[in-house]
Image (cartoon, rainbow, N blue to C red):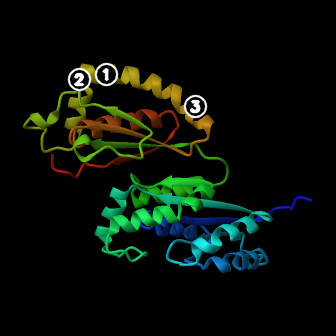
Amino acid sequence: MKAHKSDRLSTIILTGLSGSGKTIALNAFEDSGFFCVDNLPSSLIRTFVNLCTKTPTISKIAIGVDIRERKFLTNFSDTISTLRKKRNIQIIFLEATNEVLIRRFKETRRPHPLGYKDLKKALHREAQLLSRIRQEASTIIDTSSLSPHQLRKLIIEFYLKKGPKEMTINLVSFGYKYGIPLESDLLFDVRFLPNPYFIEELKPLPGTSAKVKKFVLSQRDTGEFFDKLYPLLNHIIPLYKKEGKSYLTIGIGCTGGRHRSPAIVQEIGKTLKKQKLEITVNHRDLDHLS
């Protein structure tokens, strides 16, 4: 006889790579009314969930677990398998590219939990150790292009509000000289447009400024680009929704990511918002000096 799953307790297991934003995500759950606990030993997860089930005042919990707990890898899969026989468990796995994780560790100056002196080796080893758990995840979120605010917004919109949410479209402007955003599902190169960098009045201004946007958007080639881009997006976005994608990342690149691509991204975001789509905008390289 198949076990009946209890729906009273909403249970989120939050895990993933170190530096991928788990603390920010867990705080978003806590601020939205979840009973949260971080770095709980795997051996205690089942006991904790069962106790919460028996507590009438607790209806939703979020548990943060990761590589800091050394027996995490040994016990996790068996623990989750046992819980899933009786309860609805969602596993959210956060990750990011090595380049982004390295930058975040350098900014915070915190050591990697595995204790390796070589950060690249630590990240590679952690990804290997967590590969099986990643396969068990209900949802995988790449936070490479997300600011803390955007990650918090994504968590709240998709997991904390009632009812199914629209797919979020993340628009990223970037400069090819700094590398493409690896998390992109779609990439468009706008280096064919006239470059404001070579106009003395516009060079020091960002692509989000009114003057640069006016220059970029007034070009005939820009208009023709949009005339072809929007029909394509209007065709494929519903298909991505149908496929069940939670969010779609579209990268728009120019040489330095400071002028043309931010202006184009701003305009695309403005247009798509009119279609009642959930949009986030990230100008990855806007602060670089071109």
Q: Residues within 10 Å of mark 2 (few under 14, many from 20)?
A: few
The answer to whether 133 is drawn above or below residue 203 in the figure is below
Circles 2 and 3, Cβ within 8 Å, touching? The answer is no
Circles 1 and 2, Cβ within 8 Å, touching? The answer is yes
110 vs 232, left or right, is: left
225 vs 92, left or right, is: left
Q: Nearer the viewer, residue 221 or 179?
A: 179
Q: Which comes sooner in the sequence, label 3 or label 1? A: 1
In the rendering, at what x and y percent does residue 228 appear? 39, 20
Residue 148 visible: yes
Q: Which residue is mark 2?
A: 219
Residue 40's tag is none
Q: Which residue is mark 1?
A: 223
User: Residue, x 42% and y 32% (percent of image)?
Assistant: 271
Amino acid type shown at disc 1? Gly
For label 3, the SS is: helix
Q: Which comes sooner in the sequence, label 2 or label 3? A: 2
In the rendering, at what x and y percent does residue 8 appear? 78, 65
The answer to whether 52 is drawn above or below residue 129 in the figure is below
Whole-Å distance between the Cαs marked 1 and 2? 7 Å
Amino acid type shown at disc 2? Gln
Q: Which residue is mark 3?
A: 239
For label 1, the SS is: helix
Question: Which image quadrant for residue 226?
Answer: top left
Residue 207 visible: no
Q: Nearer the viewer, residue 173 or 100?
A: 100
Q: Nearer the viewer, mark 2 or mark 3?
A: 3
Amino acid type shown at disc 3? Leu
The extreme left residue here reads 200
Q: Nearer the viewer, residue 164 or 249?
A: 249
In the rendering, at what x and y percent does residue 290 appear? 15, 45
Question: Which image quadrant for residue 87?
Answer: bottom right
